[in-house]
Image: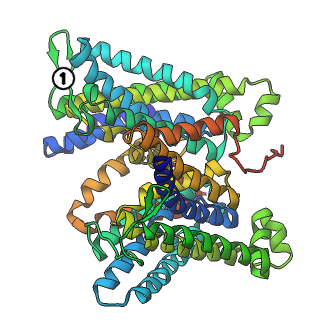
Amino acid sequence: MAEFLQFAFSGLTVGAVYALVALGFTLIFNASDVVNFAQGEFVMLGGMTTVFLALAGVPLPLAALMAVVAAVAVGIALHRFAIEPARGATTVVLIIITIGASIFLRGAAQIVFDKRFHSLPPIFGNDPIRIGGASILPQSLVVLAGAAAIVLLLWVFIDRTLFGKALIATASNRLAARLVGIDTRRMGGFSFAVSAAIGAVAGILITPITLTSYDVGTLLALKGFAAAMLGGMGSALGAVVGGLLLGLLEAFAAGYVSSNYKDAIAFLVILAVLFAMPRGLFGRAKIDRV
Amino acid sequence: MAIVAMVVIAVVMPVFFPSAYYYRVAALVFVFALAGIGLNLLMGFAGQVSLGHAGFIGIGAYAVAVGPTHLGLPPWLSFVAGAALSAIVAFLVGRPILRMKGHYLAVATLGFGILLSIVFTNEAKLTGGPDGMSVPRLVLFGWAARGSETWYWISAVSFVIGAALALNLIDSPTGRALRAIHDSEVAARVLGIDVARAKLTVFVISAVYASVAGSFLALFNGHITPEVSGFLRSIELVAMVVLGGMGSIVGSLVGSAVIVVLPQALTFLHDYEHMVLGLIIMGVMIFLRDGIVPGLAAALKRRRT
């Protein structure tokens, strides 16, 4: 039992980060049909910017805030200068553009920052809390609480504000949204900004546990994308559930089977789910129009 | 026409090569272009995405390494066995995977490619693990293939043959069926095309192209690591096809040239290499969204009229 709990804790912690990355994917996908493979770079920017600002003597909370602002600026610039000019291009062309952007951002990070691994001090120290024979780092609880807060905030924002409703309208029918006076282009830029902020926060929260470096984004984008697909592309609930599930899968596979094959097992399960449910766990059935 | 042009390019180009290094880079361009043609058949003609094609490159590469080292097979037989194995794997995996569409197909193929590269990394007894293993030379009738120049010609000839076969396929009934599927799967089905079978056929063919390219790559380098089958390689392949132009066989060669030569050519920028590479990829896709070859062809036509 203690073992089980231990694996569950570590799975949920990593899963929360996957969930946030997947949520970023989903948000951008809904608002602009772009699958943003540079999503992981936002996570990297959040962590790395905070680390270097803190090293330069900026107090940690301020550094974190500035890192989020920086990531948002990058997100908006990405939309404005790379996605917007290619409007109307096919999905795969847009994917290649975001991959180009992620190579660019990684290259920039290795110049602006460096190529080493960095960490941040955990907010509540390093003494593990014992629960049912398993131990959990206080920072893990911070990650989980942070992820929950983000999901809640996002839900309130999208469900309760006019701006959020405009975003939903854009997601369900771009043309109809434009006809009722919604600036759908602005919605696209906005979704990039919010996704960047979510990614950056995830990066700051997880850095004390998993460390960060200029190239952590690639793997995170991969896992976030897989999580989003597992949940069902376009579903925010699916993204969160998919992320947590992926994290748990990896943790249990590593614990009970083989840590070398944890990614393999995770992907096998994803493949199995997609074979059975080709639209993911929470994806809407889509009817092709002829 | 296109074939003649490519033969001329392959024959004339070496005149301008000042050193063996150029033969080496050009050979790599042809090898990756071969894999690119296969993926282009799948993506450009049938309209199906694969983010896991490097997995098949891995099968081909490890076949010529594991076959002679552990099973005592001659390299040429291992080469053929690798291609056959890739075809079988593609056939078995393709049936369920190709029922998916769009992004779901992307993530399924992605998972498949990653599975293969994890196997190559972890089965250290057979594959040497993350450090990789050395590959014995290709020996045919007592003649050993060695040196960049020899490999330039081997890869150039293979590329031209591969391109000719692909062009032939495109003009066949199967090719027309594929293009119909690309335009509208439902319409193709209404016309009586066996959609599932046509997709599976092209998936198997593209896997064999990738496998052959992988075998050449391993034999040419003399050493392989699991990195050949990694996720980044798969992404590079897709980038080659899209940059060069989906649905353009010449485009695959141009795309491969861009992806292989650019990082070599940009090394003088040192730390700025990746930034510039990213910028070029974004720029090409923004300004020539149909890809380099179709994009430039359209621009030329517009100028003429």
Query: Which quarter of the figure has residue A243?
Result: bottom right
Measuring from the top left, give residue B258's x and y in whole percent. Answer: 37, 51
Instruction: List the residue tagged with mark 1.
Output: B136
Horizontal and vertical percent position of residue B192: 79, 23
The crowding category of the residue bearing disc 1, from other C-alpha atoms within 10 Å (few below 14, some 14 to 19, many at least 20), is: many
Query: Taking the image as drawn, is residue A267 in sight?
Result: yes
Quarter residue B31 falls in: top left
The chain under label 1 reads B
- Residue A156: x, y in percent? 73, 76
Q: Amino acid at mark 1?
A: Pro
Q: Residue at x 47, y 28 (%)?
A: B207
Compared to residue A171, the image places residue A286 above or below, namely above
> Is residue B211 or residue B279 the one in the foreground?
B211
Which residue is rendered at x = 28% and y = 87% of the image?
A: A56
Query: How far from the left and from the top, in percent, is residue A288?
Result: 80, 44
Which residue is painted at 79% across and 79% down in the image? A160
Q: Nearer the viewer, residue A282 or A173?
A: A282
**Left or right: where does residue A260 sit relative to residue A25?**
left
Most foreground residue, A200 or B58: A200
**Total numbered circles:** 1
Horizontally, residue A266 falls left or right of residue B130, namely right
User: Residue B1 vs residue B77: left or right?
Assistant: right
Q: Residue at x 78, y 74 (%)?
A: A159
Q: For the residue labelled by badge 1, is the local secondary structure a helix, a strand or a loop?
A: loop
Q: From the viewer's side, name the closer residue of B9 and A2.
A: A2
Quadrant location, the C terminus of chain B:
bottom right
Looking at the image, the residue that sits furthest to the front is A132
Kindly tell me whether residue B169 is visible in this rendering.
no
The residue furthest top is B141
